[in-house]
Image (cartoon, grey):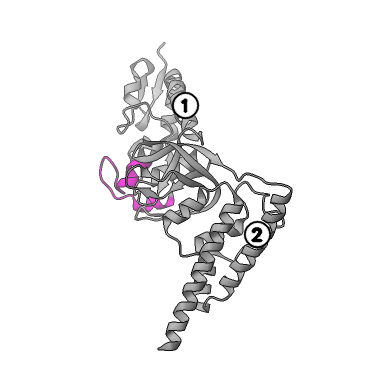
Amino acid sequence: GVQPVSVCGGRLVPAELLDSGDLECSLCMRLFYEPVATPCGHTFCLKCLERCLDHNPNCPLCKENLSEYLAGRGYNKTLLTEEVLQRYLGDELADRKKIHEEEMNELSNLNQEVPIFVCTMPRYRLMIRRSMETGTKQFGMCIADDLKGFASHGCMLQVRDVKFFPDGRSVVDTIGVSRFKVLSHGQRDGYHTAQIEYLEDKKVEGDELVELLKLHDAVYDQANGWFTSLRDNMKSQILSHFGQLPSKDPDPQASPSGPPWCWWLLAVLPLENRAQLTILAMTSLKDRLMAIRRVLIFVTQSKETATKKCKKK
């Protein structure tokens, strides 16, 4: 009357002899969740295997090289293991799934624990992958800070594409979507996290808006003039990395972060990180435009001085 369980090799084992300990991942020591098999025949939880391959391209058990497998991301679910879990260890699997979902919900909160990429941080693979898995496809980026680990303001990035390579490297294509202020610093599994508050420009109206529009048009023309005056080789380098200068915005207050051309220009101008950070933190478009105008005046004067020196020689 005991229902048998069919296992590998066609052998039949009584269901009462099956224990959750028989189906534990050797990496996390918990019941398999989304079990996958490597080409060398070993089974692990998908997330456990991915984390191991972040640091070493070899199988955690037999040490066979899995570089090609890693690059292709062709993880194969072990359907038999999954079927045995669902059929005979349903309650244990439901508990394991609940824990996994709670962890994913925690990782999805883009205010309480935002993953932060710090420009000098080596452990970015897990952070990027989690951003993709949770579906947010976003993470924060901050410059490094010797005292706090990373700066007090940063930019949220949206992942557009990720390419993986056999040696473990990856290329992540992102675009900036919003700015934030860091309220508290944290860490999770070797990468930085933060509780944040999103930043928005304060809108103005009436006479202030009239003045802002004049300033906006004047600084845009100044920026366009500076870019047009650059040497061809420098101009082509900028165009290949950052694309064309975005067009002038008919409504500079339309976006919570102001006109896109300002951020394009700040990425292109020869500014130190700290100066960029100061402008990033501003919530007044007028202040940002005036700061950009000062930088443009400085780089234009420096260029004129250098040209005069060359002529004298």
Q: CA distance from mark 2 to mark 1?
A: 49 Å
Q: Quadrant of the C terminus?
A: bottom left
Residue 120 shows in this picture:
yes
Circle 2: residue type: Leu
| 10 shown above or below 192 | above
As helix, strand or loop, the secondary structure at mark 1 comes to helix
Q: How would you rate the neighbour count of disc 1 (Cα within 10 Å): few for under 14, some for 14-19, many for 20 or more?
A: few
Q: Quadrant of the N terminus?
A: top left
In this rendering, would 10 be left or right of 251?
Answer: left
Give the residue displayed 42% in from the left and 16% down from the top. 3
Residue 102 disc label: 1
Specify whether residue 71 is painted magenta: yes
| 133 shown above or below 12 | below
Give the residue displayed 35% in from the left and 42% down from the top. 148
Residue 164 disc label: none
Q: Position of residue 245 (x, y in %)?
A: 60, 65
Residue 75 shows in this picture:
no
Q: Start and end of the magenta stretch?
A: 50-72
The foreground one among 183 and 300 is 300
As helix, strand or loop, the secondary structure at mark 2 comes to helix
Residue 215 disc label: 2
Mark nearer the N terminus (2 vs 1): 1
Give the residue displayed 66% in from the left and 45% down from the top. 203
Q: Are marks 2 and 1 in contact (CB under 8 Å)?
A: no
Q: Position of residue 167 (x, y in %)?
A: 34, 55
Q: Position of residue 195 (x, y in %)?
A: 46, 35
Question: Looking at this rendering, what residue extends furthest in the front direction?
Answer: 207
Q: Select label 2 or label 1 by which is in front.
A: 2
Q: Position of residue 231 (x, y in %)?
A: 51, 78
